[in-house]
Image (tube, rainbow, N blue to C red):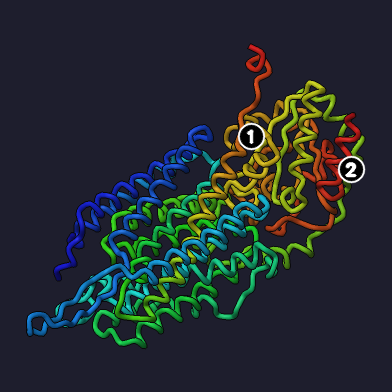
Amino acid sequence: MEHVAVNPWAALAYLIAGVCFILALRGLSSPTSSQRGNRFGMIGMALALITTLITHVPTIHVLVVGQAEDVDYWAIFSRVDPLALLEILAAIGVGAAIGLTTARKIAMTAMPQLVAAFHSLVGMAAVLVACAAYLNPAAFGIVDPFGQILTVSRIEMGLGVAIGAITFSGSVIAFAKLNGNMGGAPIMLPGRHVINLGVLAGILLLIAYFTQDQAPWVFWTVTLLSFAIGFLLIIPIGGADMPVVVSMLNSYSGWAAAAMGFTLHNTAMIITGALVGSSGAILSYIMCRAMNRSFISVIAGGFGAEAASTGGAAKVDRPWKRGSAEDAAFLMSQAEQVIIVPGYGMAVAQAQHALREMGDKLKEHGVRVKYAIHPVAGRMPGHMNVLLAEANVPYDEVFELEDINSEFAQTDVAFVIGANDVTNPAAKTDKSSPIYGMPVLDVEKAKTVLFVKRSMGGVGYAGVDNDVFYMDNTMMLLADAKKMVEEIVKSLD
Amino acid sequence: MDFIAILSIFVLACFVGYYVVWSVTPALHTPLMAVTNAISSVIIVGALIAAAASGSLGSKWLGLVAVTLASVNIFGGFAVTQRMLAMYKKKERPAAAKH
């Protein structure tokens, strides 16, 4: 079971790269240190890349046959293969060009899709590396003296290819749902739980069998089944559960990298895999907690579909008040403090810039403006914060749920824009509600609630009506979020 | 390195990850996802080994494709993280600007 000797300097370089990655995440503890953290990440990656390029430079063997002093001789020389090296550098160059252009052009509202697309690339890369290792195990130093792949490596490879493939196909579906190529509604296959569990069990059994028999059919079947299960797992999950899905896939991409790190005995990959894996897992946990749902229930999917079909019957016409932009402008300009509660609707309407303008105008009127962010507002963790930052809202005006919730009672106006379920008081009072127990923003405690919504017809993702709409102190502002905010800004002049 | 040594690194790194990620401010969760995405592309190390190895043409080409995909992620991931982080600004203090 002896491995190919590892160059100690290379091992040290990989370890340093791993430490740089830890520092990159550490930097994100505050916005002020975050950019330095990101630079550590880049340094670590450059170190890992250069070390690998140097230690694994492509070589060709040249056979020299000659005759000297009537004696035939031959010798084999190894030298750098310039063509192969050029191919590798070209591959990096092409990838860099695509990556940098995308990063520069992408709109901030499209960030969830972009992250999903990037996850799919990591997944695919992991699959390809595992396949390459299967086809050419000697190059990875994972063969025993009989030319068979080491048992440990077979498990690692099998897990690597499976997790990678699930990450890939799952992320492709998540991308399609977030990007609107595919409806956000859950797609439910009959007997999907049985199918999914069966396929998962099949994959694990085949990986176990792979340790006994390294036949190609075993490896390729594991790969194909894993692509299929990634697809099957994500299609029944609805749009607003995407924060959990994106975090989960983030976690998977880490575990895939870790599995390949085990195969290659590479500390940089193992440390990174562990970091990314736990990061995604923690984010999934935070998102689930913010919805008061178990991870299992999110993964099982179908949330919202049942509630929407049953909730329709109980609907009664209840009185509600409609307001105009002028009313809203007047109310807010008279207020001492306004708390703005943005949600996914703000992102869809691209209203963040107009919203910041409104905030500025209010401040000119001497109003204190704060923003309250629910952890699951938007389609990925921290989605709202990025959009507000893009619109130049200072981050010290933006507060998390637990830090601001007690302030609603002393607030004159709560301005809800594009959020619904996260403000629904039924989560606190109605035990039969599907969102019961979910932590919500106490907007109803504010003196006045201004609720920007496209129309009265639609309900939130959970498919439940929101009592806030019908309260005496609520004024519904029915319009496109961006247009409404722009009109309010005009009225504030 | 034997398996147990590697496993030890992995387990300890999981703990480091756990504590480091909990200390990330929720406002930066989107950049966190973008940067973890970028660093998980360290899988390019495996891709480079496959691309540089001789012996299997199939393995080499799979490696080259993987190098390209991982590079998209590395450069794109760090660049987009940088772009996002540069947007997070503190409130301008009017008093501080004058003095």
- Residue pictured at 77% horizontal, 28% vertical: A412
Disc 2 sits on a residue from what chain? A
Residue under circle 2?
A321
Residue reaching furthest front?
Answer: A69
Hey, which quadrant is residue B45 in on the image?
bottom left
- Residue pictured at 87% horizontal, 45% vertical: A320
> Of helix, strand and loop, which one carries label 1?
strand
> Of helix, strand and loop, which one carries label 2?
loop
Q: Tell which of B66 and A410 is nearer to you.
A: B66
Residue under circle 1?
A398
The amino acid type of the residue labelled 1 equals Val
The amino acid type of the residue labelled 2 equals Lys
Disc with the residue nearer the chain's start (2 vs 1): 2
Q: Tell which of B81 and A71 is nearer to you.
A: A71
Q: Which label number is shown at residue A476? A: none
Q: Tell which of A440 and A46 is nearer to you.
A: A46
- Residue pictured at 56% horizontal, 51% vertical: A292
